[in-house]
């Protein structure tokens, strides 16, 4: 059976010096061969007639549009209003003569690469507009020859759960219950500790996977644009505004979760308007005289001390109270007892992605576990990704990023941490053992301990960062 994934992506063009008539085009779109062909395409296809009526969607487009009922021809404006596609910016650029742009999914925020081609119709001043929406992730997988696999909510929840230390799991469970009751959650912690992963976990644990999760990094929005981006704006609200207006982040999160990341960066001048939304659930787009009722749940996060900011006047107390119904303190990685488990999880993910195991030598593992990780989980993942590129099978200290090259004191601490609890350095008694004999005795204890624990010479060689021939030679030299 042929599936969309079996057909590589390609461009469809119409050759010929003479344009088809409008009736000929319409018959083509209604024909069974055309529909069978279009429905096999992995890309989304939307066709609009010269009168601005959407006359055809292929199966991929119909699924992505998330229409409440079976598709029937309708005006483009009606289609935009009831489908999951936010095409306003793209269509505005088409009016300015552009043929390429971006289309955003309203519920998930997913971005499609959009192209518009004009199919000329003889006897009319215009023609049919063919819109092709391509998922960049599918295109990349096709280029690499890697089959696509959607990440299910269960997978995402499990991945997030692995990042939770034992003393935080109870708070996460309580936060999930608070979310289910529409209470606001405030995640507190240093940059890189996993606030976004926890927010997604809580969102996914709260219900249907189709609900939107809109992640807003408040620190990335210029102060002058904060209100228009957050609350949206009407047509002609200001110079440079899109002709069709624009939906804001809050409205895009309707029915789902609005994740306000880095809320300590929200401009003081915009805080009253956000406070009003949190109090009564209404927003008023810039340039509009009418308020809208929006139902969405709110999770906020910050790495700043908001209490101190309220004392200095940088953050409103009433806004803090509205956002922090259930605060969750997330510890930094250096204070967690499960660093080894998290490191192992990241190595497993890297091994799965590369299609081959990525292991660490004992010395490399010791250096990593003794590292302070000021960048927390984000820094650990960056280091693992670096080793994934430069190491073949077993990563050694030489495969660490330049910034992680161990100093002599760090190497000594790492070497000390390699000693098993039940193995001590041989006592130095003058005249009883030579330096060579003491070094050999200690080496044999380390190798034997690894063999007892791992059960094979190959596994011991990988952990100790040597080849298996070295292990065989050193375990067979008792008769030397």
Image: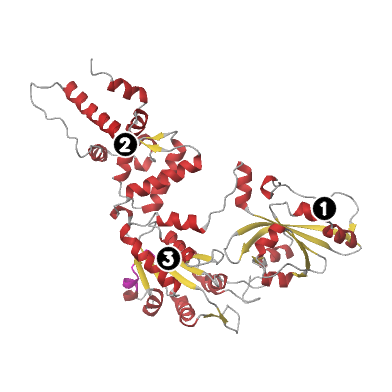
Q: CA distance from mark 2 to mark 3?
A: 38 Å
Foreground mark, 2 or 3, reads 2
In the image, the segment drawn in magenta is 301-309
Please tell me which residue is depicted at 47% across the width and 81% down the height of the picture. Answer: 276
- The percent coordinates of residue 157 (x first, y second) are 46, 58
Q: Is-magenta flag for residue 307?
A: yes
Q: Is-magenta flag for residue 389?
A: no
Per the image, the residue denoted by label 1 is 33
Q: For the residue labelled by badge 2, is the local secondary structure a helix, a strand or a loop?
A: helix
Q: Quadrant of the C terminus?
A: top left
Specify few, some or many for label 3: CA neighbours under 10 Å numbering under 14, 14-19, or 20 or more.
many
Mark closest to the chain's N terminus, 2 or 3: 3
Task: Judge whether 167 appears above or below 356 on screen.
Answer: below
- The percent coordinates of residue 252 (x first, y second) are 57, 70
Mark closest to the chain's N terminus, 2 or 1: 1
Mark 1 and 3 residues: CB-CB less than 8 Å, in contact? no
Per the image, the residue denoted by label 2 is 362
Number of numbered discs present?
Answer: 3
Please tell me the numbered disc located at residue 262: 3
């Amino acid at each position: 059976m042929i599936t969309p994934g079996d057909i590589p992506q390609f461009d469809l063009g119409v050759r010929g010096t003479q344009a088809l008539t409008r009736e000929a085009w319409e018959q083509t779109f209604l024909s069974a061969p055309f529909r069978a062909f279009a429905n096999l395409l992995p890309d989304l296809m939307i066709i609009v007639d010269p009168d601005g009526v959407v006359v055809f969607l292929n199966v991929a487009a119909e699924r992505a549009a998330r229409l409440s009922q079976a598709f029937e021809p309708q005006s483009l404006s009606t289609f935009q209003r009831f489908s999951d596609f936010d095409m306003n910016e793209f269509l505005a650029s088409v009016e300015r003569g552009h043929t390429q742009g971006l289309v955003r999914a309203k519920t998930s925020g997913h971005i499609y690469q959009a192209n518009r081609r004009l199919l000329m119709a003889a006897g009319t001043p215009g023609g049919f507009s063919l819109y092709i929406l391509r998922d960049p992730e599918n295109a990349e997988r096709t280029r690499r020859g890697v089959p696509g696999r959607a990440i299910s909510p269960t997978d995402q929840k499990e991945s997030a759960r692995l990042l939770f230390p034992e003393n935080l799991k109870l708070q996460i469970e309580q936060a999930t219950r608070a979310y289910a009751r529409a209470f606001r959650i405030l995640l507190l912690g240093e940059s890189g500790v996993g606030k976004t992963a926890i927010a997604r976990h809580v969102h996914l644990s709260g219900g249907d996977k189709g609900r939107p999760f809109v992640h807003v990094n408040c620190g990335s929005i210029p102060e002058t644009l904060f209100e228009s981006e957050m609350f949206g704006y009407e047509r002609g609200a200001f110079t440079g505004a899109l002709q069709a207006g624009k939906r804001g982040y809050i409205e895009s999160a309707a029915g789902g979760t609005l994740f306000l990341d880095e809320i300590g960066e929200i401009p003081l001048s915009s805080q009253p308007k956000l406070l009003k939304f949190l109090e009564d659930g209404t927003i008023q787009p810039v340039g509009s005289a009418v308020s809208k009722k929006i139902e969405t749940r709110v999770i906020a996060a910050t790495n700043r001390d908001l209490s101190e900011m309220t004392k200095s006047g940088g953050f409103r107390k009433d806004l803090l109270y509205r956002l922090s119904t259930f605060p969750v303190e997330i510890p930094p990685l250096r204070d967690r007892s499960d660093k080894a488990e998290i490191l192992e999880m990241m190595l497993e993910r890297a091994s799965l992605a590369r299609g081959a195991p990525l292991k660490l030598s004992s010395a490399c593992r010791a250096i990593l576990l003794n590292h302070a990780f000021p960048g927390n989980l984000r820094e650990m993942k960056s280091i693992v990704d670096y080793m994934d590129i430069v190491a073949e099978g077993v990563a050694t200290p030489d495969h660490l990023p330049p910034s992680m090259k161990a100093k002599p004191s760090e190497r000594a601490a790492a070497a000390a941490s390699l000693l098993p609890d039940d193995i001590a350095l041989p006592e130095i008694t003058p005249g009883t053992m030579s330096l060579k004999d003491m070094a050999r005795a200690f080496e044999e204890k380390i190798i034997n301990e690894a063999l007892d624990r791992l059960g094979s010479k190959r596994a011991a060689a990988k952990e100790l960062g040597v080849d298996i021939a070295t292990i065989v030679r050193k375990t067979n030299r008792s008769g030397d």
